[in-house]
Image (spheres, rainbow, N blue to C red):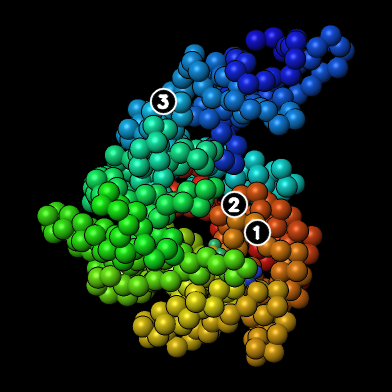
């Protein structure tokens, strides 16, 4: 490869390039920068950024272009010329190039990378995102790795659809592709039970002639199949999501929608009985849409209890128990959520009054509550707030209050009045987009001595750290990544920011 290529035209579909992969980007794609002149003008050099699926840092590959947007070129590996020494054989049959049948699963983007190397790559992803935002003076620690690097997910949502041969599928979408659904025969992120259950449910639906829902045509019935299971309690909740239609098509003709849901529920229970496994709750949720009205999720318990239970163990040995409803958010890797909670606690120091912003169902706030005087949580979703309150009561926690509303509104509302001026630490765990400008403004006005920032997106973390540093909240100690999602490019991070006097 010469330093500057002379290209007859800008990279286009099906062109092939020999590339050296420098790093992975925030989405787990291999990055290679190519400088080239284009066309007859050899005086002007352009820089093309190639993003290559399933290529690893340090690898030399021949890559085939699949799309280009301005100077950003998406490509797939055609030939692996020099594999990374950290490349390993994938465990799952669905890892591989997207153009091979039932391969290219978007669930695991890093399964071909040895786990210690995954952690090193994730540290680089965080470092790169911070540097890009101008945060260059804050070190990034080695991520806290997971003990279980497979079968760790406590929630997985699988889609009904069709594969490339138009056969009914139940599974995940290929990475970067939202049309076909892979017909999964196994999944190593969920329990072995759930992995075996998937093809059973799919085969039943196929044999009965039930139809997957297609949004573009607004036809069909089956939408999602979700399994939630706790590693600590062993409890399990299964949810079938369909359209809101009253009837559905089957091989025997049109049947009442409820018959289809009950048939699936019976198959799940029969399979669990045969395997000697527990299923504590089965839900049927109908996604009811009406022109001009908001989509409603109407849920009904078909078997068992209305919630399943998760448990988190805190430093010092105390355990918290959470009743989790199908609509409630719960950290999808509960074992590593315990590590995350311990990292948060270690950064709260001697704070007595803690505000848990973006608190969801209060998981982090409730983990903190036994160690401080008071916790006040703020969350947009009213159901999650109700859940948080119920979870506090179920655990005998009396020093935690949860308020529903937008962080930007609640922090300056009367309801928050009794905490204003008393909060000495704010715990923030925003969605991927990070803090909205108004939220930053109100956080600064709240003036806690400490902010413990938990982030699921290194890019928004970098941006917010830069904004908060300009407002007087500077990092005290390194950023600590915690790996909640082995085999994927996702990474959580925790950092302590202190208000300058
Ligand atoms: C990453 S989750 C936090 C989860 C929570 N800390 C836990 O451990 O369960 C982000 C949460 O922020 C909430 N959220 C999003 N925008 C919000 C806003 N403007 N104000 C308050 N909460 C918001 C979401 O509903 C979601 O529950």
Quarter of the figure that contains the N terminus = top right
Query: Residue beneath label 2, please?
Result: 457
Q: CA distance from mark 1 to mark 2?
A: 8 Å
- x%, y% of residue 216? 54, 47
Compare marks 3 and 1 and give the one earlier in the sequence. 3
**Side of 284 relative to 382 (left or right):** left
- Tell me where residue 164 sits by quadrant: top left
Task: Give the residue drawn at x 35%, y 27%.
Answer: 89
Question: Is there a contact, CB below 8 Å, between mark 3 and mark 2?
Answer: no
Location of residue 88 in the rendering, given as x and y in whole percent from the top left corner: 37, 28
Measuring 54% from the left and 38% from the top, which residue is drawn there?
176
Number of marks? 3
- In the depicted structure, whether residue 72 falls above or below residue 331: above
Q: Residues within 10 Å of mark 1 (few under 14, many from 20)?
A: many
Q: Quadrant of ligand 1?
A: bottom right
Q: Secondary structure at mark 2?
A: loop
Question: Residue visible at 41% across and 28% down?
Answer: 96
Q: CA distance from mark 3 to mark 1?
A: 37 Å
Contact, mark 1 vs mark 2 (Cβ under 8 Å): yes
Residue 135 or residue 290, whichever sits in front? 290
Q: Which residue is mark 3?
A: 100
Q: Nearer the viewer, residue 164 or 11?
A: 164
Regarding residue 363, the answer to whether it shows in the image is no
Label 3 or label 2, whichever lies nearer to me, is 3
Secondary structure beneath label 1: loop
Task: Relative to 341, say whether 137 is above or below.
Answer: above
| Residue density around tag 2, few if under 14, some if 14–19, many if 20 or more, within 10 Å | many
Residue at figure coordinates x 27%, y 63% from the top left: 259
Left or right: 395 as drawn, with respect to 179: left
Q: Earlier in the sequence, mark 1 or mark 2?
A: 1
Which residue corresponds to mark 1? 434
């Amino acid at each position: 490869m010469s330093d500057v290529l002379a290209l007859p035209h800008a990279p286009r579909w099906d062109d092939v390039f020999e590339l050296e992969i420098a790093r992975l980007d925030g989405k787990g794609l291999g990055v290679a920068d190519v400088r080239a002149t284009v066309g007859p003008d050899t005086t002007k050099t352009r820089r093309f950024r190639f993003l290559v699926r399933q290529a690893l840092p340090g690898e030399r590959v021949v890559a085939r272009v699949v799309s280009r947007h301005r100077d950003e070129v998406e490509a797939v590996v055609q030939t692996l010329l020099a594999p990374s020494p950290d490349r390993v054989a994938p465990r799952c049959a669905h890892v591989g190039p997207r153009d091979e049948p039932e391969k290219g699963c978007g669930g695991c983007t890093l399964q071909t990378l040895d786990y210690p190397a995954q952690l090193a790559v994730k540290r680089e992803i965080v470092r790169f995102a911070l540097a890009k935002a101008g945060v260059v003076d804050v070190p990034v620690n080695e991520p806290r790795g997971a003990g279980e690097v497979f079968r760790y997910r406590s929630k997985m949502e699988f889609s009904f659809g069709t594969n490339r041969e138009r056969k009914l599928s139940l599974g995940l979408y290929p990475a970067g592709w939202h049309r076909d659904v892979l017909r999964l025969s196994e999944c190593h992120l969920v329990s072995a039970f759930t992995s075996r259950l998937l093809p059973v449910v799919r085969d039943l639906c196929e044999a009965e002639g039930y139809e997957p829902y297609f949004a573009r045509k607004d036809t069909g019935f089956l939408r999602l199949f979700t399994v939630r299971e706790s590693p600590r309690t062993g409890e399990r909740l299964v949810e079938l999501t369909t359209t809101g239609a009253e009837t559905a098509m089957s091989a025997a003709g049109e049947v009442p929608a409820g018959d289809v849901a009950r048939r699936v529920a019976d198959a799940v229970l029969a399979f669990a009985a045969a395997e000697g496994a527990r299923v504590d709750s089965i839900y049927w949720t109908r996604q009811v849409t009406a022109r001009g009205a908001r989509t409603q999720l109407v849920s009904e318990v078909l078997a068992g209890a209305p919630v399943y239970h998760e448990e988190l163990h805190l430093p010092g040995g105390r355990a918290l128990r959470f009743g989790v409803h199908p609509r409630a958010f719960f950290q999808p890797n509960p074992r590593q959520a315990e590590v995350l909670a311990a990292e948060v606690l270690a950064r709260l120091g001697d704070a007595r009054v803690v505000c848990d912003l973006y608190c969801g169902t209060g998981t982090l706030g409730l983990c903190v509550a036994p160690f401080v005087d008071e916790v006040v949580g703020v969350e947009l979703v009213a159901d999650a707030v109700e859940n948080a309150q119920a979870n506090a009561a179920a655990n005998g926690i009396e020093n935690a209050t949860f308020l529903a509303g937008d962080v930007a509104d609640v922090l300056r509302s009367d309801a928050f009045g009794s905490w204003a001026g008393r909060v000495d630490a704010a715990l923030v765990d925003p969605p991927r987009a990070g803090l909205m400008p108004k939220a930053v403004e109100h956080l600064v006005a709240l003036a806690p001595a400490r902010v413990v920032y938990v982030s699921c997106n290194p890019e928004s973390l970098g941006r917010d750290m830069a904004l908060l540093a300009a407002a007087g909240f500077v990092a005290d100690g390194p950023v600590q990544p915690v790996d909640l999602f082995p085999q994927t490019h996702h990474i959580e991070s925790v950092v302590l920011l202190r208000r300058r006097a």
